[in-house]
Image: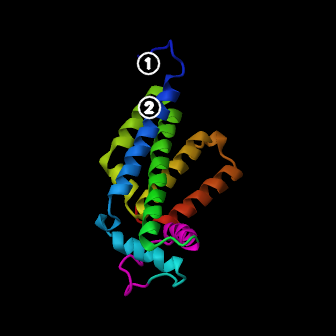
């Protein structure tokens, strides 16, 4: 079915799987109550606190106060957009779930891209795309409010950039590449320090 006679099979197969996976993830968001997720209420409270201009939580107001703030700041920005257009809290929570769906899809796509770069095979990349995209833990993260999803996606994106730049070989090292990659690591630390 996927022989050499059809050189385009990986592209339509990748696209078809990603459309299907997106549909599953979106269905999960629609069906899933955000309060069912682990620490769901605490994540929402952290985000909404920032969105309403109340500042970072302290340990007395939210037990997730020790979490690094970048994920919550990005999510608060999305929440503020929803507030600007008059969305209610439940609508904003759903918007934020869709943002996590984006991060999960980015994680899956970057996993497949990394497999293509390292394995130098579209078939291996497709296998990784299907395998990672079908994992229950990834599907779960796609519907949760959690900094984990953004962190995993950005780690994979960082690895894609690292291997795409051929930084595993010291001959390809230069100041610009290391500066960019170091800034990427700095961003990761502000998303989640305790991986």
Q: Is residue 96 above or below residue 120?
A: below
Q: Which mark is residue 100?
A: none
In the rendered image, residue 103, in percent from the top left (x then y), is placed at 48, 54
Q: What's the residue at 65%, 40% (across, down)?
A: 171
Mark 1 or 2: in front is 1
- Of the two numbered discs 1 and 2 on the same chain, state the one appearing first in sequence: 1
Element at badge 1?
loop
Instruction: Report helix, strand or loop for mark 2.
Output: helix
Q: Nearer the viewer, residue 52 or 141?
A: 52
Q: Which residue is mark 1?
A: 2
Q: Which residue is mark 2?
A: 126
Q: At 41% from the left edge and 50% from the top edge, which residue is drawn?
A: 26
Marks 1 and 2 sit apart, C-alpha to C-alpha, by 12 Å
Q: Is residue 18 visible?
A: yes
Coloring basis for residues: rainbow
Give the magenta part as a residue range: 58-84
How crowded pointer 1 is (Cα within 10 Å; few <14, some 14-19, many 20+) is rated as: few
User: Percent from the top left, x then y, of residue 53?
Assistant: 55, 82
- Seen in the picture, residue 80 relative to 166 is either above or below; the reply is below
Location of residue 149 in the rendering, given as x and y in whole percent from the top left corner: 43, 57
- Percent position (x, y) of residue 158? 54, 50
* Residue for point 46% across, 39% down: 19
């Amino acid at each position: 079915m996927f022989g050499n006679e059809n050189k385009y099979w990986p592209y339509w197969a990748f696209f078809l799987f990603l459309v299907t996976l997106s549909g599953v993830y979106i269905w999960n968001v629609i069906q899933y109550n955000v309060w069912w997720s682990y620490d769901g209420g605490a994540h929402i409270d952290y985000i909404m606190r920032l969105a309403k201009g109340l500042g970072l939580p302290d340990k007395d107001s939210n037990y997730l106060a020790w979490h690094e703030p970048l994920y919550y700041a990005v999510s608060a920005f999305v929440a503020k957009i929803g507030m600007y257009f008059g969305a209610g809290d439940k609508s904003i929570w759903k918007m934020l779930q869709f943002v996590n769906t984006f991060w999960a899809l980015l994680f899956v796509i970057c996993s497949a891209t990394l497999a293509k770069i390292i394995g130098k095979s579209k078939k291996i990349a497709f296998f990784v795309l299907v395998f990672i995209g079908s994992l229950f833990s990834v599907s779960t993260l796609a519907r949760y409010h959690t900094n984990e999803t953004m962190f995993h996606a950005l780690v994979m994106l960082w690895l894609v950039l690292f291997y795409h730049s051929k930084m595993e070989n010291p001959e390809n090292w230069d100041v610009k590449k290391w500066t960019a990659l170091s800034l990427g690591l700095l961003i990761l630390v502000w998303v989640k320090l305790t991986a």
